[in-house]
Image (cartoon, rainbow, N blue to C red):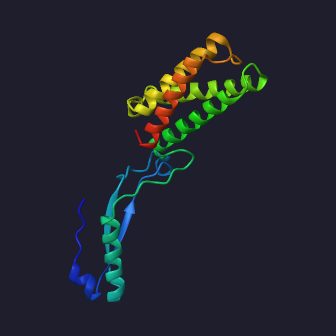
Amino acid sequence: HGLFFDIPNIVSGTNMLTLTKTTTSVAGRISSTQPQRSRRAAVVVASTQPTSRRAAVTTLLGLSAAILSPATPANAFLGIGEDPSAKYTEQTQTLIDSVRAALAVEPRTDAREAAMKGVKEKTVAWVSAYRRDPKFAGRPSFSQMYSAVNALDGQLVSFGLKANFPAKRLDRMMKSIDDAERALKRGR
């Protein structure tokens, strides 16, 4: 797949080289009578039209820059191509903030029930997204947050959404949340 250029002819301006990239598309395959083309082919076409030295050097520099430049990652579009680590950090921090806000609501009220219902939905989504992914399941922030979420969900299932948390369980859960947040800020 190498390209060979006749450098003296490019610089002298007697020949102009054009690089054409041919790709087979799905639309090109609709007719079964068309012959199959290769997926990628580089074709060098020589022309007898005289070109200036500046145009030839500019073309050569443009081609070499395009060939030698490193590939850059595509920007995220509709969540495709996002950095999973950044998404994990954002969702975990959001969950931490939601749990703290819900625990700050007065127990045995309708507001507490609504807040805990929202937190329960977020915890289920967070656990299902990251529990089976080895990139995240081994992180200290995950294990600490998973411990806190497990204690929270156990409390909610056993005693209901409006119930008050026992002081020892609340302290242990808040310590796990604080440790998870600290580890999250360190990128762990």
Q: Nearer the viewer, residue 17 or 183?
A: 183
Q: Nearer the viewer, residue 143 or 86?
A: 143
Name the residue furthest front.
Answer: 167
Left or right, 11 with respect to 73, comes to left
Compared across the picture, whether 38 is left or right of 29 comes to left
Where is residue 164? Give x, y as percent: 67, 18
Image quarter of residue 149? top right
Say left or right for 117 vs 130: right
* Any part of residue 50 in sight: no
Q: Residue at x 45, y 30 (%)?
A: 142
User: Dividing the image into 4 quarters, which one contains the C terminus?
Assistant: top left
Quarter-wise, where is residue 125 in the image? top right
Q: Position of residue 169 (x, y in %)?
A: 55, 18
* 82 over 40 or under it: above or below: above
Query: What residue lies at 47% left-to-right and 33% top-to-bottom?
Result: 180
Residue furthest toward the top?
Answer: 158
User: On screen, 144 above or below 14?
Assistant: above
